[in-house]
Amino acid sequence: MKADASRQIGHQHMPSEHGQPHGRPIRKKRAWHLGTVLLHLALILGSVVMVFPFLWTISSSLKDISQIFMMPPSWVPDPFVWSNYVDTLRAMPFDVAYFNSFYISIVVVVASLLTCSLAAYAFAKIKFPGAGIVFILFLSMMMIPKQVTIVSLYVVIQKLGWVDSHLSIIMPAAFFNAFGVFLLRQFMMGIPRDLEEASIMDGANPLRIYWNVMLPLVRSALVAFGIFAFKDIWNQFLDPLIFLSTPERFTVPLMLNMFKGLYVADWALMMAGTAISVIPVLIVYVIAQRHIIEGIALTGIKG
Amino acid sequence: MHDRKRKWWGMLFILPQLIGLIVFALIPLVLTFVISMSEWDGFGTMEFVGFANFLEQFLDPDFKKAMVNTLYYSLLTIPSGIVLGLLLALAIHNIRGKTLYRLFFFMPVVTSSVSIGVIWIWLLNGDFGIINQLLGIVGITGPKWLTDTQWVIPSIAMLSIWWGLGFNMVIFLAGLQGISQTYYEAAVIDGASAFRKFWHITLPLLSPTTFFATIMATISSFQVFDQAFVMTSGGPAKASYTLVYHIFNRGFVESNMGASAAAATILFLMILVLTLIQFKFSRRWVHYEG
């Protein structure tokens, strides 16, 4: 903290010291103060704490029984037991779970992007009777945690005949996202009216304006919300746990939960199953980290 | 001229989400209140019983246990999660290698509760877990984390902080980015110390972010379920049995829908009241610019 602040001072001195506000800022040679070094050490230690559980999972997943209980622990498996992964995939159809999670998430994200942005556009730019009260309804529903209504949502899903069907996961997520409506409305409110005005003069109908003018203008918000929604639906646990019972329809978290129940003492296999659930996610994360972090941050803050 | 037509378009545009809101949120909410005042097994006929279910909850030792556990968990996770997130954001805000640190600290946020849960069952295993082995190297005999009634909630709290730290960090980083440098420049001219700048500039200007993060953390900590379900099944001896676990158990395991809905209603009211209190107190410490 202190080191951080003192460096900030140094930073602010720069323009006056060098007196060239227009030139490229000249990087002052940073002396490696003790504080800075300690800060980096603490952060590196912290980073290890954050990443180590994943590395240990992968390491454990490649060990055999004799290695996994070894004391003191062996950090690197010797030999690498790749067959743990084959055994895991043979025991549990993670490929099917991946397919389910993937298509459910894609459908939900595309559908909720459409429905939320449509509603957001209406709330932001169109005057229609009841807009105020309906918007307040959306805001208040946003405040209600899902867990509160889970029992009666089950009753509703049952009446609709969607129990143990993917519709039970897809439909509520695709057609009800008060937060998404609110978020996209916030962004659309910031778009100046004259950008639409020309199209309105040309007699374009609101659907065309929404599609051709508004959506391109809020593309970054759509991407951010899309990422946020994808992460949410992919990692969702309580809803699938309650609604789905046939293993062939399970999503990845649900499949891992079942796998854990069946192989509770076989640590190497359990870690292989966990690695299968986590490695693809982490690969996508590392590749698209900037978009993912900023997307989640943006949606988190605007909400 | 176009206005009348536009009005219809507007109503059409909100229709998909409005139908969804009615079917998947409004009806379930009303239904929750109705069920909470009924005796119902989920199949037969509902019988109106007034506030009996609520009374029963307050006398139910399981409900009490769930309440105590949830409050304890919240107390352990909310303040430390916020403080750690803030310190972390301050630490990496202007540092070389910020992107890399951010990458590492945010990593757990994208993974699912079940993956996290299973990983930590293994790390915290009392006999063979790596954490106790590492503690053993420095001569500490670690507790049986997840199978010890005293340690199970602190264990789950610990991994939840680890899981959510990156999210808080990113929220605070965005908050820090929003603070205009001119304040610091003025403070430098006044010869303010680093601590004074933090205390009189950073903290007050960051207060809306802190407020937001606190509200989010409160709501999510009262909803804790996944970790307890995956890692300990609420045990040992219900030591990690939480409110949402109770709602789940009464409703979907015991088919006592009335009790489940009553507990859910109490949870809802608790979150509502806590949020309102936080909003009320926020006037004292949250500073909005302009």
Image (cartoon, coloured by chain):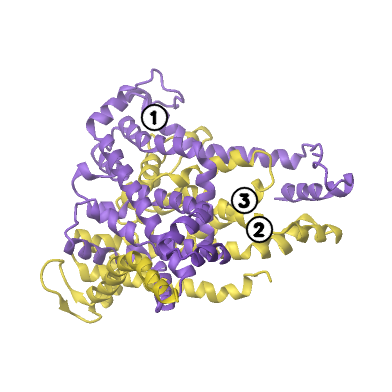
Chain colours: A purple, B yellow
Gap between marks 2 and 3, in whole Å?
Answer: 13 Å
The chain ID associated with circle 2 is B
Q: Is residue A87 above or below residue A176?
A: above
Residues A107 and A263: in front is: A107
Q: Earlier in the sequence, mark 2 or mark 3?
A: 3
Q: Quadrant of residue B177?
A: bottom right
Where residue A38 sits: x, y (%)? 69, 40
SS state under label 3: helix
Q: Is residue A102 above or below residue B215?
A: above
Gap between marks 2 and 1, in whole Å?
Answer: 43 Å
From the viewer's perspective, tell me whether residue B181 is left or right of residue A269. right
SS state under label 2: loop
From the viewer's perspective, tell me whether residue A41 is left or right of residue B267. right
The chain ID associated with circle 3 is B
Residue at 39% across, 78% down = A130
Q: Is residue B104 above or below residue A176?
A: above
| Residues at marks 2 and 1 touching, judged by CB atoms closer than 8 Å | no
Instruction: Using the rendered image, report if marks 2 and 1 lie on a common chain.
Output: no
Residue extending furthest toward the front: A202
Few, some or many C-alpha atoms within 10 Å of disc 1 (few <14, some 14-19, many ≥20)? many
Which residue has dot 3 on it?
B89
Where residue A61 sits: x, y (%)? 37, 29
Whether residue A110 is visible to the viewer of this picture, yes or no, is: yes
Looking at the image, is mark 2 or mark 1 nearer the viewer?
2
Which residue has dot 2 on it?
B178
Going by the numbered disc 1, the residue's amino acid type is Ser
Residue at 25% across, 73% down = B31
